[in-house]
Amino acid sequence: MKAELVEIPGYVAGTWTIDPLHSDIGFTVRHLMVSKVRGRFGSVEGTIVTGDDPLDSSVTASIDLASIDTGIAKRDEHVRSADYLDVAAYPTMSYRSTGLRPDGGDFVLDGELTLRGLTRPVPLKLEIGGFGPDPFREDDPFKGARAGFTATGEISRLEFGVGDTVKVPGGGGLGLGEKIQIVLEIQAALRTD
């Protein structure tokens, strides 16, 4: 049974390539229970397939973990180490959708995230930014129609074996928060081949 869908203005069915130059893979994690640290990954690639029925759409994506950037090079090197992401053994993390369902005026993208060799279900709240032409990029390989998406969610770093469970002295919580907030701003280009 198909659910009633909201109108998606300008919707285009097709196969799209994620444009890494106009996409942002960001995250936030609590540090020492008093503040949050933000970071991003600078290298992403993937494919989005928008079906004739939007609920038949799918996405696959891969992120180069060495491209992490928290604004502090020394911290980035530590996060790349075996203490956290273990980039030498696991250079990428990947996401593969398993379904799409309506959620009010937006959607939930169900899928599986693989990080450090472990795969876990990770649903993402999905907002469709829109579909339209790119009149400024006639000479770029992504010329043609563009689509924009915002996806948000959270993962437990401990479920993926990332980091430790050292606690803040004096009965505080974890020195590095368990939950990592994810914000994905994705622009994709319609394939014409």
Image (cartoon, rainbow, N blue to C red):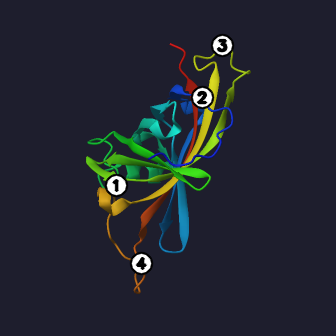
Give the numbered dot on residue 173. Answer: 4
Q: Is residue 35 above or below residue 77?
A: below
The residue positioned 45% from the left and 60% from the top of the image is 180
Which is more N-terminal, label 3 or label 1?
1
First along the sequence among labels 1 and 4: 1
Q: CA distance from mark 4 to mark 2?
A: 47 Å
Residue type for callout 4? Gly
Residue 2 falls left or right of residue 121: right
Looking at the image, which residue is at 43% across and 64% down? Answer: 179
Check disc 1 and report the residue beneath it: 84
In the image, is residue 162 above or below residue 129?
A: below
Contact (Cβ within 8 Å) of mark 1 with mark 4: no
How much space separates mark 1 and mark 3, taking CA atoms? 40 Å
Secondary structure under tag 4 reads loop
Three-letter amino acid code at the position of disc 3: Asp
In this rendering, the label closer to the viewer, 2 or 3: 2
Upstream in sequence: badge 3 or badge 4: 3
- Labelled disc at residue 12: 2
